[in-house]
């Protein structure tokens, strides 16, 4: 309603009309509505852009919690190789993994089991070549080639790969550069599978026998670290190494400490621990490994044949000395373990 003021002078009177004041609440409502409309428009534009993003970077998907896994999520990736055209595999999600182990701990056999899965490619002991682990730069360069799917070995599959990895021995630059490697694993979403032996005494027998065969070449002048027939296994197992009983307990402790150090260094990564003996006696452990990698669970097989079977007393030349050294110690159990 218009307001007016009457003014009276000596000669005349005047009426001044004053326009009405606008309500501050009304102006605030206009500003609020305008801000809401602008906000909705900006959100709709952003959602359209995110919906059109090309999923070439890694994503997170739920993963069942493993008893040795520190994270509930595993990363999937859509790599873009530089050396070949993925074509039909371009939208196939890939998981990255690494088998961390020690020599003669069953990693070769374990890797053949994984490679029997038609969607898994594990590329062997790639850091056995010194130039690939000479410094952290060469290590990262090698890792990038593997996880960008630019690494070709006999493990490469014709089918689209669901998991890509390799095996890495603890003494091949892994622990010496653990801080940078842990950062790389976490940044790129690499899952670690630790593979150890419960009985390091049997591993010691395998290490010494394999070292001897490098020079003796017992199989028709050819050195073989792994065999595929019982006849070959029997031929290699005939050699009985002599174990240094004086340093034996110290050597066993060093092996245990090395494994403990690796687990401590990599405790912030997504990882699981697998024992060679469990893989042999409990085949459901392989199912758990596949679930850890978030790949379809399948029956896995290997053509490799175990070399040193049966009692350890049949495979150690100075068995009496070893038996005497370990009896009554915490390592006595290793004398009678089956695997």
Image (tube, grey):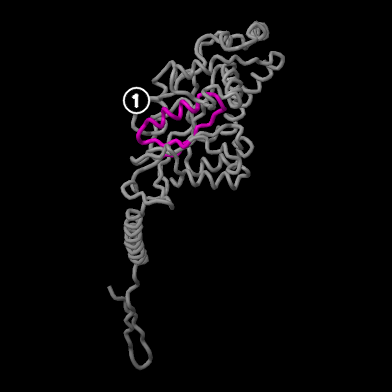
Residue plotted at (45% across, 40% down): 153
Q: Is 338 in front, or is 43?
A: 338
**Range covered by the magenta-colored residues:** 95-123
Q: Residue furthest left?
A: 1
Q: Compare residues 203 and 224 and report the one nearer the observer.
A: 224
The mark tally for this picture is 1
Residue at horizontal 50%, vertical 46%?
144
Q: Position of residue 56 (x, y in %)?
A: 39, 50
Residue 19 lies left or right of residue 239; in this view the side is left
Residue 147 magenta-highlighted: no
Q: Is residue 164 above or below residue 21?
A: above
Mark 1 secondary-structure assignment: loop
Quadrant in the picture for residue 135: top right
Quick one: which residue is furthest to the bottom in this view?
11
The residue at 43%/38% (across/down) is 154
Residue at (44% x, 15% y) in the render: 281
Name the residue tied to disc 1: 299
Q: Position of residue 42 (x, y in %)?
A: 35, 60
Q: Residue 103 in magenta?
A: yes
Image position, residue 29 (x, y; %): 33, 62
Whether residue 251 is situated above or below residue 111 in the rendered picture:
above
């Amino acid at each position: 309603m218009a307001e007016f003021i009457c003014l009276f002078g000596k000669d005349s009177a005047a009426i001044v009309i004053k326009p009405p004041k606008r309500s501050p609440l009304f102006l605030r409502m206009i500003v609020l509505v305008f801000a809401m409309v602008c906000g909705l428009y900006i959100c709709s534009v952003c959602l359209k852009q995110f919906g059109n993003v090309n999923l070439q970077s890694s994503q997170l998907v739920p993963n069942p919690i493993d008893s040795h896994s520190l994270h509930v999520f595993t990363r999937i990736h859509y790599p873009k190789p530089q050396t070949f055209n993925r074509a039909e595999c371009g939208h196939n999600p890939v998981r990255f993994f690494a088998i961390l182990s020690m020599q003669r701990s069953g990693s070769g056999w374990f890797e053949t089991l994984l490679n029997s899965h038609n969607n898994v490619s594990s590329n062997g002991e790639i850091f056995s070549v010194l130039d690939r682990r000479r410094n952290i730069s060469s290590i990262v360069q090698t890792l990038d080639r593997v996880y960008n799917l630019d690494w070709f070995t006999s493990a490469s599959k014709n089918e689209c790969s669901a998991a890509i990895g390799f095996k890495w021995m603890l003494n091949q630059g892994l622990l010496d550069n653990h801080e940078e490697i842990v950062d790389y694993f976490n940044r790129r979403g690499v899952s670690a599978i630790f593979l150890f032996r419960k009985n390091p005494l049997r591993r010691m027998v395998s290490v010494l026998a394999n070292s001897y065969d490098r020079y003796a070449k017992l199989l028709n002048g050819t050195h073989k670290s792994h065999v595929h027939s019982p006849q070959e296994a029997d031929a290699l197992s005939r050699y009985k190494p002599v174990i240094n009983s004086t340093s034996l307990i110290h050597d066993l402790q060093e092996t245990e400490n090395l494994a403990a150090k690796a687990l401590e260094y990599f405790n912030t990564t997504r990882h699981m621990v697998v024992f060679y003996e469990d893989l042999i006696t409990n085949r459901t452990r392989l199912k758990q490994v596949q679930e850890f990698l978030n790949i379809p669970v399948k029956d896995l097989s290997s053509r490799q044949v175990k070399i040193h079977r049966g009692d350890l007393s049949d495979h150690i030349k100075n068995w009496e000395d070893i038996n005497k050294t370990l009896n009554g110690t915490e390592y006595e159990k290793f004398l009678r373990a089956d695997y």
